[in-house]
Image (spheres, helix red, strand yellow):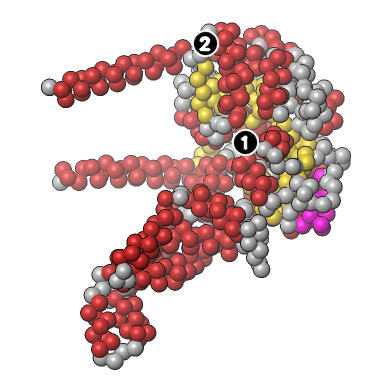
Amino acid sequence: MKLLLPAAAVLAVFAAALGALFRWSVLEFVPGSLQTGGVTLANFRMVMAPQYLGAIRDTVVLSALTTVLTLLAAYPVAYALARTPSRRVRSLLLVLTLAPFFTGAIVRTYAWVLVLGNTVVTWPVPMLFTERGVLVGLVHFSMPTMILILAAALSHIDPAYERAAASLGARPGRVFLRVTLPLSLPGIVSGGLIVFAWTLSAFPTPEMLGGGKVKMIANVVRDLGLDSFNWPGAAAFALVALVLTLGMLTALGRLGARHAP
Amino acid sequence: MRARFGLTALAALLAASLAATPAQAQNALVVSIWGGNWKDTVERIIGKAFTARTGIPVEYEVGGTIDRLAKARVAKGNPLVDLNFTTTHVARLYISDGLYDKLDMAKIPNAKEITREAVRSDYHVGSWAYVYTVVYRPDLVKEEITRWSDLWKPSLKGKIAMPDFDPSHIITIAALMEGGNEVNWQKGEAKLRQLKESVAAFYSTDAQSQDLMKTGQGPVQVMLSVNAYHLQEQGIAVKVVQPTDYPGIVGIDTMAVMAGSKKADAAHQFINLALSKEIQGELVKALRAGPVNPGAAVPANLKGQPGIFGTAAEWKERGYIMNDDARAKNLPGWREWFTANIVKK
């Protein structure tokens, strides 16, 4: 029981923070003042306006697309990482995968500002300050983590299964679809959940690549709290977003568990 | 034995350093200000002169506008800082929360010299001024821009960047164009909507604004004059427009004494020194911001430039000062309207 005390202490801090968030969310916002009025549900009515719900919808759509595209882009790299017999190739892949981790989110995103703008490359369609550009940045940001999770899952699959399928006449494509892919599903589910969850709270990428036109949940919370001085509104929006996020992650988790091999 | 001696020595050192810290803080005047160039300039020009004259050391607490406001709120009644620098309409929030003390003007004789517009309330006075105006890169925008209304030209479509953290400047300009002002700003709503397609990007920070100009992603901007001059210093050829149709929107950064400060006298001395014409002249050169003391010497290359007001007439003719209260109260509503109608796709 005593061993649980440190965990309880840490969780108490989290609970206190959530309690403060809830308290702020039900206090009346007085424009032009830091003073708050009485208890009200007006902040929740405000964040149900189309522009705020639109930010939540955009966040969910961008997060889902990021998850799918990251998965598609990361899987071949993870597969190569797990299956290559060459230690040199594996080291090279690992270095290339981990390198973005060491550059920091701001530096990486700033590099994308230059690439997605028309200063370095001329794009056939506008990329910078659009959802497309934000999506590129989010996928790039998520790829190293997805690759590592998938590679770990793939490396746990005994190659004997694939060899057995091949020895029974299955072509490589069929071996992959019927053996490797289903067995790597736990990695796909956990990688997908992690990428989806953290993309829901993305901040610097939409802030810098969205040019103020693409707002995700964290950007709206910041705008409300720091630019409009509307702390109760920011708290209410954060709370609504938190509840929706938890709901979605729970549903996805259950879905993943149901389809896991 | 050696380990125990080492630990004892370390503990003694730690105790000594802890004991020294409050003593140092007790003597020092603590000034809250934004970081970077703002803090460096105030430290170099006002802080050092203040310490030389009074013998009182100055410490600085740096942070963003809202970070510092939040800290001040938490420490209400027993402030961690003695003197605060912030923008005039944000100062209204401090005042509304009882975070500032009334200024004792008898202790600030130099306040008699400053321009009327810089005395913002009984609680806060201006330290320097600037304008939000049109700034552009002539190498990327071939036509000359001379007026606010040029922003509405179809040829500038997709080239403009403006702040979304505080759209009050363009909202006020649109209202002025339609015969309104910041109070009945709704008069400019239709005019503003016409601008929607012209905006390439919105920026949330000064750094983003400068990046957009440097990279050419936002070569025409509603921009802080001080930032534009900073870009010029860095070799980016930007033109700061002195609009001929409507004036630039004035911003005034202000100083105030925190309520409950135990260094209120020293804080008043600091403010008095900051308002002297000598220090104001130094601030103009360093920040390229407008002096609040008209007696300050303005370098020839800055005279008459946007945001640099030398005389009472220039303050009146070349700058539009919004009502602080209206701005502080309307800002949340402006942002909401702006996001829904201009920013949103």
Q: At numbered mark 2, what does the secondary structure look like: helix, strand or loop? A: loop
Q: Which mark is residue A32?
A: 1
Q: Check disc 2: other Cα within 10 Å, few if <14, some if 14-19, many if 20+.
A: some
Q: Nearer the viewer, residue B87 or B203?
A: B203
Residue at numbered disc 2: B56
**Residue name at image x 71 percent, y 37 percent:** B232
In the rendered structure, the residue with mark 1 lies on which chain?
A
Q: Do the residues indicated by labels 1 and 2 lie within the same chain of the protein? A: no
Magenta-highlighted residues: B148-157
In the image, residue A26 lies at what x, y percent? 48, 45
In the image, is residue A43 part of the stretch drawn in magenta? no
Give above or below for B153 relative to B173: below
In the image, residue A175 lies at what x, y percent? 32, 84
In the image, residue B238 lies at what x, y percent? 75, 42
Q: At numbered mark 1, what does the secondary structure look like: helix, strand or loop? A: loop
- Classify residue A17 as left or right of residue A130: left
**Residue name at image x 60 percent, y 30 percent:** B37
Give above or below for B16 relative to B154: above
Q: Amino acid at mark 1?
A: Gly
- Classify residue B173 as left or right of residue A190: right
In the image, residue B111 lies at what x, y percent? 70, 14
Q: Name the chief secondary structure element in magenta.
A: helix
Label 1, label 2: how far apart the Cα atoms are: 35 Å
**Residue name at image x 55 percent, y 12 percent:** B51
In the rendered structure, the residue with mark 2 lies on which chain?
B
Q: Nearer the viewer, residue A30 or A165?
A: A165
When asked about the image quadrant of residue B283, the answer is top right
